[in-house]
Image (tube, grey):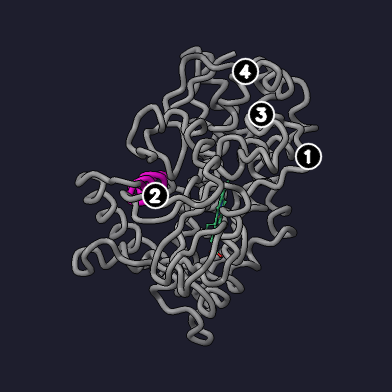
Amino acid sequence: MLDFNDASFLADPYPQLSELRAAGRPVWHDELGLYLAANYDHANAVLRTKTLGRIFSPKQPESEWSEFNWLHADSILDSEPPKHTRLRSLISKAFNRGKIESLRPLVERLAQELADECEAKLATDGRFDVIADFAEPLPVKVIAAMLGFPTSDEHLLRPWSQAIVKMYEVAPTDADREAAKLASHEFAEYVRGLMDVRRAHPGTDLITDLVQVEEEGQKLNAQELIATCVLLLNAGHEASVNGFGNGLVAALQREDQAELLRTRSREIAETAIDEFLRFDAPLHLFERTATADTEIGGVTVKAGQKIASLLGSANRDASVFERADEMDLTRDPNPHIGFGAGIHFCIGAPLARMEMSTSLPVLFERFPNLRLESEPIRRPTFVLRGYERVYACQ
Ligand code: HEM
């Protein structure tokens, strides 16, 4: 039985995930009270099967947790059709490939500016933190710009998001729970205020677009609007930061892959990013609840029971990926499910890919001999897998 609190499992979950796949069928996990689908086919099927829904069931008492609960229940991610279809069609326009491509020059400029700051740190301290100084500010700035979140308040986003996502882990502490509750309240109130400002003074941003949709034909109520903006602000950076950090560290720890990045980063950027996400996924577990008895991989998930799709495990399945435990930044095709599958497939995938494949070459062209300065420090979590600090030098 997997122990999600075991430090050695959290440091490197892949050997045990491989054993889980060897069972050949979803396995019941008592502590979590759900099936774990670890094989590629099963994890993929969990995400694509209509009778397995994303249904938010409040784990916390409604009275004190109302904001945390509706921030989830009313967001696109925790909705199912027909509400999901409505929310998705409203925001998907902002995330289509053409729109995203038009942001590339902005992303390139931001990456260059961050690289300037990293260079300055390198000159004074002999190192910089790839997470705090490069991987994190970039997607935060981009999603904030898209939504029209004031630049002067960008620093609030990451702490709010970090506090909220601690609740997605297997066993949040009391302190984590209090921090998540407070962050939900502050974040929701802030976005509510921003909506009021945009209603009075429209801009050219996504919040303005959504507020106008709300006014035109009650398509989106205030809670749905706030919940969706909060989700976009959080999902819009959390996995990108971790995906970039996880992949970069793994590549720098493998001399042949590091050499590829040092010499051909621009040429291989697209395949490298997908391999970053496949090899050490930033998001490992997504739950679904059966709305009717559903068979997955020879196991019947009864109506009301839960099953989780293990994305990071699926992406190491040797029946789909050759040399699955090896990192190959030129891997093509690479049908990983790091962005999910089915109706909830990541709406931000084109944005995340564009950000990461633009910023990766900037980093290596500026620091051609980039290497790890010390042992990177991981966060001890499973569901959202990422590094706390990654000091690099050259
Ligand atoms: C490397 C970065 C990213 C990864 C690995 C990632 C991964 C995922 C995954 C696995 C899901 C599906 C969850 C499920 O099926 O339960 C998802 C959904 C979603 N993601 Fe991302 N994501 C990333 C970046 C982004 C960005 C930049 C945005 C920007 C807005 C974003 C917005 C969303 C939204 C709104 C959903 C919900 C879609 C729906 O329910 O229809 N993500 N993401």
Residue 87 in the image: state x and y as whole percent.
Answer: 54, 73
The correct choice, above or below, for 327 with respect to 296 in the image is above
Mark 1 or mark 4: name the one nearer the start of the chain. 1
Query: Type of residue at label 4?
Result: Leu
Q: Mark 1 falls on what kind of element? A: loop
Q: Give the spatial CA distance, label 2 vs label 3.
A: 30 Å
Which secondary structure is most common in the magenta stretch?
A: helix
Mark 2 or mark 4: name the one nearer the start of the chain. 2
Label 2: how many Cα within 10 Å (few below 14, some 14–19, many 20+):
many
Tell me the magenta residue range: 155-169
Q: CB atoms at circles 1 and 3 under 8 Å apart?
A: no
Mark 2 or mark 3: name the one nearer the start of the chain. 2
Query: Type of residue at label 2?
Result: Ser
Query: Type of residue at label 3?
Result: Met
Q: Is residue 141 magenta?
A: no
Mark 1 or mark 3: name the one nearer the start of the chain. 3
Q: Residue at x 66, y 29 (%)?
A: 327
Left-right relation of 254 to 309? right
Residue 207 in the image: state x and y as whole percent.
Answer: 51, 66
Q: Closest to the observer: 188 or 284?
A: 284
Mark 1 or mark 2: name the one nearer the start of the chain. 2
Q: Mark 3 falls on what kind of element? A: loop
Residue pointed to by mark 3:
327
Q: Mark 2 falls on what kind of element? A: helix
Residue pointed to by mark 1:
332
- Please say whether residue 124 is visible from this viewpoint: no
The correct choice, above or below, for 27 with respect to 385 in the image is below
The correct choice, above or below, for 289 with respect to 113 in the image is below
* Disc ID at residue 370: 4
Residue pointed to by mark 2:
161
